[in-house]
Amino acid sequence: MKSNLQHSGETALDRISTLKLPTLPAGTPFLLKSLTDENIDFVELATILEKFPSIAGKLISLANSAWSAPVTAVSSLDASCSRLGFGVVRSTSIALAVAAPFNASRCPSFNPEYFWCSALLSAEAASRMAQCAVVDNAAEPSTARAAGLLHNLGLLWLVDQIPAEAEEAMAMVKANQAASLRQSMSHMLGYDQVEAGGYLARQWNLPAQLAEAMTHYPEPNFAGDHCEIVTTVGLAVKLISAILREEPHFETDERQPRLGITGENFEAISKQLTGQLANTRQIAKVLIG
């Protein structure tokens, strides 16, 4: 397996900066701000989403899907939002908005259904953990949801921009030549998908809380700015990774007591999200369909 680390003195950011920066669709920053507003209601949210026809169409399609199983057809956006619920509407809308600039089809090993299932479940886990957290400056649930959804966006950028290298990195993991995708990416590229995601968040001028979470969520002892949301997202991602791998419940993570989440609440979140796995896979299929 070859490595691209031949330029001494070149930093990870130097290498990442050579990638083509994707352009967010017009109005996306405003949409992200609206979707993380705890005080917005269904009517106001539907009015905003009407300005994004592709997202509105997907939401109506999802509301009429076998997953939603409505008794009668749902034909309006506000009725679709009401049918789906705030959580699904927020997560789906953010996913559709940020995924628009990327094309992952040139990387055969990339599994978009798994990617978005992981993102959606991480978003739900982060939101629920934020609600249960007993700590000063706890993350707002809607902001934690957005951060959980976007935590692995760097991978989507890499499979779009450097599909051959991403394919090779994934092959290393599959062949047990690397312990993780982060390790194989670092070996080949000099940076990994987390560093790429953090760079992308800053270049897109995403809110500082989201950018910090995307950059530092794997660090269990992170103590910088916005450490509450970083800690929440990191714990959520770890839980969802275990659920998707069908691993036995892992021992208490140090981030759990730091957030003030009781063992009972954590166990309840784990059981709820395990139970949502099949439905979330269906949502992911609609999302990428």
Image (cartoon, helix red, strand yellow):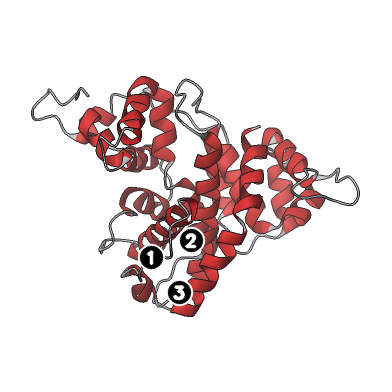
Please tell me which residue is depicted at 64% across the width and 38% down the height of the picture.
285
Q: Quadrant of the N terminus?
A: top left
Residue that lies at the very extreme toward the left in this rendered image: 8
Residue 195 makes an appearance in the image? no
Is residue 248 toward the left or the right of residue 114 in the image?
left
Q: Is residue 117 above or below residue 1?
A: below
- Residue 126 tag number: 2
Mark 3 to mark 2 CA distance (whole Å): 10 Å
Which residue is labeled 1 in the image?
250
Q: Earlier in the sequence, mark 3 or mark 2?
A: 2
Tell me the kind of residue under disc 3: Ala
Q: Is residue 19 above or below residue 76?
A: above
Element class at badge 1: loop
Is residue 185 toward the left or the right of residue 247 in the image?
left
Label 2 vs label 1, nearer the camera: 1
Please tell me which residue is depicted at 45% across the width and 51% down the height of the picture.
245
Camera-side residue: 57 or 68?
68
Please tell me which residue is depicted at 38% across the width and 30% down the height of the picture.
158
Q: Earlier in the sequence, mark 1 or mark 3?
A: 3
Q: Quadrant of the C terminus?
A: top right
- Residue 85 tag number: none
Which residue is labeled 3 in the image?
133
Camera-side residue: 5 or 42?
5
List x then y, in percent, for residue 82. 77, 56
Label 1 vs label 3, nearer the camera: 1
Residue that lies at the very extreme toward the right in this rendered image: 72
